[in-house]
Image (tube, coloured by chain):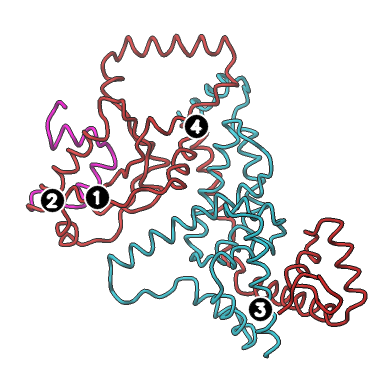
Chain colours: A red, B cyan
Amino acid sequence: MRTRLSGADSHLSDADLIRLADGELGSGSARSVLGHLEACWQCRARLRELEGAISEFVRLREEAFAPAIPAAGARAMLRARLSEEARTTTPGRFHISIPALATGLLVLVAMLVTFGGTVNADGPKPRLSITPGETRPVSLAEVCASSADSAADPIPESVRLQVFAAYGMDPAQADAYEVDYLITPELGGAYTVRNLWPQPYSARWNARVKDRLEHRLHQLVCSGQLDLHAAQRDISTDWIGAYRKYVGPGI
Amino acid sequence: MGSSLQAVVGLLVGTGRPGRSALEEEVTAFYDAFRGPLLRYLASMRIAPADGEEIVQEVFLALFRHLRDGKSRANLRGWLFRVAHNLALKNRHAKVRHAVVEASGESVDPGMNPEQLAVGNQRQARLLAVLRALPEQDQYCLSLRAEGFRYREIAEILGISLGSVANALERSLSRLSRAGGEA
C-alpha cells in the first residue's frame, strides 16, 4: 500500500493527504507533500477521491442527521429550567460582597436560632431539579428476583464527574462523597444521571443509613406490603422522611 | 414568591438586577447557536431525537453551572460537545440496560429508522451502511471533523490521542472513498 514518502517511486499515504487537506501538517511536511503532489498525478487523483468522500459524507450527514423538531418549545423549556437553576442554587462565592455576606450570616444565625435542630436533622438531600429520580420499566417479579443488596456495577468516573458538575461541585471534593442512585436499581431505579446524586460520607444520614432504608423497602415491596411505585416515590421525594416512616424515627 | 427570592439573590450577589441574569441570557445565546449542531452530532451517535433534545437541555444547564462557578471559558464549543458526548454515552448505556431488562426481542435500533427515511437515494443508503460499519470512535471523529473541529480539539472531546484521531480519519475516509468508487 501507500507509505510515507521515502523514495522516488513511493506515493503519499492517505494519512498525509488527509492531513494536508485538513491543514494538520507542520509547515516542513506540508512543503514536501505539496512538492510531491505537484509532481505526482496518482497522488493528486487520490487526494481528489478522498475529498470526494468528504463531500459525500457531508451531504449524507446533512440529510440523515438533520434535527427535525422545531426549537421553540425546547427553547422555552430551557429558559424555564435556567431560571429555576438560578433561583434554587447558591450564587458563586467569589461574587458575594462583604456587607451582603454579613447580612447572609445574620439571616443564617436567625434561621438556626428559629429552627434549631431541624436544619441539622434534615441531613443531605438530593436537589430535585437535578436528581428527580428516574425509574426503568421493570416488573415486580424482576425487582424481587434480585436480592436487595446485590452489587450494582460501579459508576464510571466520567459519570461521577458529570454528577459533581451538575451539582456545581469541585471534583477535588469528590473523595468525600459517594455518588449514589437516588432510587436504587434494586427498586427499579434507572441508570441515568438524573437518578444520581452526591451523598456525603461524613453526614449522620449517610449512604449506609440509606442502604438500610433500601433493604427495608425491598422487603416490604416483595412481601406485598408496599406498592413498588409508592416505594419509588417515597425514596425519591424525601428519603429521610421515608426512613422515619418505614424503618424507624431514629438512626 | 419565586421572583422576590430571585431579587434577594440578585442583591446578595451584588447585581441588583431583577429578572433574568446576564448569565441566563448568555447561556440562551449559546443554546441558539449550538442546539442544531449538537442535535446533529447526537443523531450521528444514534441518539433518538427526543433523547437528543433532553441531552441538549442537560448540556446547557451544565454550561450555566460551569460559567456561574467561574470555571474556564477556553474553547466552550469543544466543552459543549464533550459534555454532550459523555451524556450520550451514558444515555445509550442506560438504553442497553433497559433492553436487557425488557428482553422483549424488540430492540430496534432507535437511530436507524429516521436516518433511513431521510436518506432518499440508494447510493447514500449504501454510504450510510459503510459509515455505520466503521468503528464507533471513527464515526465520532468524522462527525466532529465535519463540525469544523481541529484534530487537537477532537482528541480533547473524545479523550483520545492526536494520533488516534488522525488514524481514525484516515481509516474512515479511505473506506468511504472506496465505497463511493464502487457505485
Q: Secondary structure at mark 3?
A: helix
User: Mark 3 and mark 1, same subunit?
Assistant: no
Residue A67 as seen in the image, left or right of residue B181: left
**Residue at horizontal 81%, vertical 70%?**
A6
Q: Is residue A249 magenta?
A: yes
Horizontal and vertical percent position of residue A128: 38, 39
Residue A185 as seen in the image, left or right of residue B34: left
Q: Which residue is mark 4?
A: A170
- Check contact, mark 2 vs mark 3: CB within 8 A: no
Q: Which residue is mark 3?
A: B176
Give the residue type that dot 2 points to.
Val
Task: Give the mark toward the camera: 3 or 4.
Answer: 3
Label 3 – label 1 distance at C-alpha: 44 Å
State which tag comes first along the sequence, 2 or 1: 1
Task: Give the mark toward the camera: 4 or 2.
Answer: 4
State which tag comes first along the sequence, 4 or 1: 1
In the displayed structure, B153 sits above or below A89; it is below
Q: Which residue is mark 2?
A: A221
Label 3 – label 4 distance at C-alpha: 43 Å
Give the residue type that dot 4 points to.
Asp
Horizontal and vertical percent position of residue A63: 64, 74
Label 2 – label 3 distance at C-alpha: 54 Å
Q: Secondary structure at mark 1?
A: loop
Give the residue type that dot 1 points to.
Ala
**Residue at horizontal 44%, vertical 45%?**
A157
Task: Give the mark toward the camera: 4 or 1.
Answer: 1
